[in-house]
Image: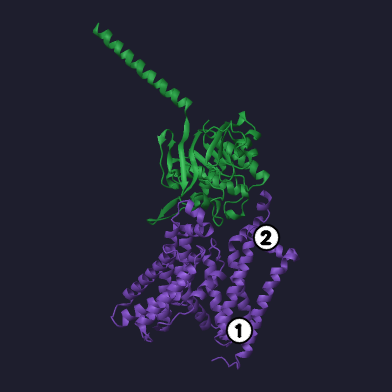
Chain colours: A purple, B green
């Protein structure tokens, strides 16, 4: 056994922590290359890159929190509704009751935390499986948001809120991007330097052992959902500021988009493997991909097809990597050495090919390509 | 006259004192039991898992617990480590009554366990595993955060000094270690506590290859030589005969007897396990 540990030595060992990160980076590079060939003029314009960051910023806080939830083997499908409901309440406080923006925003964050707490308690106390629990709570929160706002679109907020949502006060970085990056840094700190982060990995890795070690498993799972709720509320605030409007049906696909970003970033759905940097890369990747589809003038609805395919692709990839875990990077390299193992590799080639095929079909069906405006 | 009288009383008193000391010493010499379980009975609903079991373990010995599946071995050590509470019976630690309501009570009192399904988080590094649940912290700007560097140093030292194990790298995830190394990390987590007196190991060699098994057995011996009481549950009689000083045989929830390892052989123990010799089956040793 001793030899096995020394075998992948230097390069393999050093690469090991970054494996999760390599996947999304490779895909980002692929998109960049693809766009550099197909549509460089419009894609690489500063205003467009700015737009990509602005889109990504919305998902950064949620992806950070979702990293913790998923690492603990949990899932939260209610974040879209949590974001919408907190934003609606904040909007009412500002528009109807003339609350100052900071106070209303803090109340929204608190409300998000409360909704996260309810999610966590439903899962840990009532023992409802997370998938069903958060899906049901999604209906509840969305319903309350609809009851409150009816079909109303609440719009035109004070300048402070739009500054938070789409301001440009940090030179080349939009304000929400700065906020998003700060939450990412906070997440990295939580993961590496606090008990919560350490126990999150332990719980996801081996729940029974964590319990036996004396870790309050349920309490730390609730913490993760509270963090998730708070960050969803923050996203709701950012969204309101970005659009300068909010309605009860806003943010419908936050959940899948965020889960996709986190999973693409190498955080394992099977627990224990967390990567905040990967989640950040995942968020950027999805934003770049969707922006690329928009730039290519592919019909909006194809975005949803592409997102779905990316989720399947990355989960399949990481499940396969999981099997190869013990060999780590060396296992991945062995893929190319031993042709017998290339069966899975061919599968990925097929998936990638079908992704490209879909893109082409999308281009064909989206009809006339107009000149850039 | 009076003085002599007082002197005599003094001498008598001194004598008495000395005498008392001597008896005290004699008692500790013959009975240095670290753990004394008496009349342990455990019922799960209508099922009697343990029926009036006695178990004594001394300092610096390896006590093996053997028995068929369902003989009550695991229940017995789970009671000892505070995971279960006995329905009836008492436990003494160093002659003091000892009652626990949880596993952490047992750890605080110096009794810890390394479980069969290694209680290790594969996605943490060895050092993170070693300190799981009792992390070292440092204060940065008044905020208590984990002191990862110190934990790594301490973990390396515990592994090296107490177990003689040196890992190639402390930065890899525990999942990439071999079975024996993972076992060492699990044991190191238990022995890291300075007040550890009794280490319970459930099937320590079950998942290991021959080389790893030899290494783990060596580890157990060195822990015993450090003065620990090691209680080992094992299905492998070969391992039991190699490391244990005494063997406690469980059969159908009762103690089928306790034998000194160097006074018995494989066959006798085996027959006690399956209950072939009725004459040998005494409830206490």
Separation of residues labelled 2 and 1 (CA atoms): 36 Å
Residue A60 pos. (x, y %): 48, 72
| Mark 1 crowdedness (10 Å alpha carbons): few <14, some 14-19, many ≥20 | some
- The relative height of residue B285 versus residue B239 in the rendered view (above or below) is above
The percent position of residue B29, horizontal first and vertical second, equals 47, 25
Residue B140's spot in the image, x, y percent?
Answer: 41, 56
Q: Residue furthest top?
A: B1
Q: Which residue is mark 1?
A: A40
Dot 2: what SS?
helix
Q: Establish whether labels 2 and 1 are both on one chain.
A: yes
Quadrant hosting residue A265:
bottom right
Residue A44 visible in the current orientation: no
Residue B265, placed above or below residue A204: above
State the image quarter where residue B124 is shown: bottom right
Residue B236 visible in this rendered orientation of the protein: yes
- In the image, taking residue A282 as reference, residue A248 lies left or right, namely left
Q: Tell which circle, 2 or 1, labels the residue nearer the N-terminal end.
A: 1
Image coordinates of residue B37 in percent, x first then y, are 46, 37
Nearer the observer, A216 or A53: A216
**Residue at the extreme right of the image, as rendered:** A339
The disc label shown at residue A143, or none: none
Mark 1 lies on a secondary structure that is helix
| Mark 2 or mark 1, whichever is nearer to me | 2
Task: Tell me: residue A50, above or below residue B253.
Answer: below
Residue occupying image coordinates x 40% and y 83%: A247
Identify the residue under disc 2: A330
On the picture, is B242 further left or further right than A258? right
In the picture as drawn, the residue positioned furthest to the left comes out as: B2
Q: Chain of mark 2?
A: A
Where does the N terminus of chain B fall, quadrant-wise? top left
Q: How many dots with numbers?
A: 2
């Amino acid at each position: 056994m001793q030899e096995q540990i020394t075998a992948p030595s230097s390069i393999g060992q050093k690469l090991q922590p970054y494996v999760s990160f390599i996947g999304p980076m490779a895909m980002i590079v692929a998109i960049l290359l693809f766009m550099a060939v197909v549509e460089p003029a419009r894609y690489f314009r500063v205003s467009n890159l700015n737009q990509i960051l602005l889109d990504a910023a919305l998902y950064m806080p949620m992806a950070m929190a979702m990293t913790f939830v998923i690492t603990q083997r949990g899932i939260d499908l209610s974040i879209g509704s949590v974001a919408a409901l907190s934003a609606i309440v904040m909007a009412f406080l500002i528009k109807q009751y003339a609350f100052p923006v900071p106070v209303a925003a803090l109340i929204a964050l608190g409300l998000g935390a409360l909704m996260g707490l309810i999610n966590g308690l439903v899962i840990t106390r009532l023992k409802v499986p997370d998938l069903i629990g958060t899906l049901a709570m999604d209906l509840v929160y969305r319903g309350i948001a609809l009851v409150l706002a009816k079909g109303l679109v609440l719009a035109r907020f004070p300048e402070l809120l739009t500054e938070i949502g789409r301001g440009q006060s940090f030179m080349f970085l939009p304000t929400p991007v700065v906020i998003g990056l700060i939450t990412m840094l906070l997440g990295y700190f939580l993961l590496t330097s606090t008990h919560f982060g350490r126990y999150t990995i332990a719980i996801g890795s081996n729940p029974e052992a964590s319990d036996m070690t004396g870790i309050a498993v349920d309490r730390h799972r609730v913490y993760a959902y509270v963090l998730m709720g708070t960050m969803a509320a923050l996203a709701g605030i950012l969204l309101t500021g970005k659009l300068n409007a909010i309605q009860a049906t806003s943010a419908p696909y936050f959940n899948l988009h965020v889960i996709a970003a986190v999973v693409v970033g190498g955080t394992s759905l099977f627990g224990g493997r967390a990567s905040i940097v990967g989640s950040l890369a995942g968020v950027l990747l999805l934003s770049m991909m969707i922006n690329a589809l928009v730039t290519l003038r592919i019909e909006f609805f194809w975005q949803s097809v592409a997102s779905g395919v990316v989720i399947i692709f990355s989960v399949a990839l990481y499940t396969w990597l999981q099997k190869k875990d013990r060999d780590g990077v060396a296992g991945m390299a062995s893929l190319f050495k031993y042709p017998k193992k290339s069966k899975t590799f061919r599968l990925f080639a097929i998936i990638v090919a079908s992704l490209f095929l879909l893109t082409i079909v999308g281009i064909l069906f989206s009809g006339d390509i107009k000149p850039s405006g | 006259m009076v003085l002599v009288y007082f002197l005599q009383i003094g001498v008598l008193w001194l004598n008495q004192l000395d005498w008392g000391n001597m008896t005290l010493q004699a008692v500790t010499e013959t009975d240095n039991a670290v753990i004394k379980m008496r009349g342990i009975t455990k019922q799960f609903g209508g099922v009697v898992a343990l029926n009036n079991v006695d178990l004594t373990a001394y300092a610096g010995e390896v006590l093996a617990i053997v028995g068929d599946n369902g003989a009550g071995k695991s229940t017995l050590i789970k009671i000892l480590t505070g995971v279960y509470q006995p329905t009836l019976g008492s436990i003494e630690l160093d002659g003091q009554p000892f009652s626990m309501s949880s596993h952490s009570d047992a750890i605080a009192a110096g009794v810890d366990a390394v479980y069969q399904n290694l209680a290790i988080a594969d996605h943490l590094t060895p050092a993170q595993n070693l300190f799981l649940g009792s992390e070292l912290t440092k204060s940065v700007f008044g905020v208590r955060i984990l002191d990862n560097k110190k934990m790594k140093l301490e973990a390396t030292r515990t592994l090296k000094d107490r177990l003689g194990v040196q890992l190639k790298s402390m930065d890899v995830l525990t999942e990439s270690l071999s079975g024996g190394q993972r076992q060492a990390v699990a044991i190191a987590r238990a022995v890291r506590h300075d007040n550890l007196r009794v280490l319970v190991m459930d099937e320590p060699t079950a998942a290991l290859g021959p080389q790893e098994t030899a290494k783990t057995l060596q580890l157990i011996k060195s822990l015993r030589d450090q003065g620990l009481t090691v209680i080992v549950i094992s299905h492998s009689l070969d391992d039991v005969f190699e490391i244990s000083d005494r063997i406690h045989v469980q059969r159908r929830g009762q103690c089928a007897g306790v034998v000194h390892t160097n006074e018995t052989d494989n066959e006798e123990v085996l027959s006690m396990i399956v209950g072939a010799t009725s004459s040998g089956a005494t409830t206490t040793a």
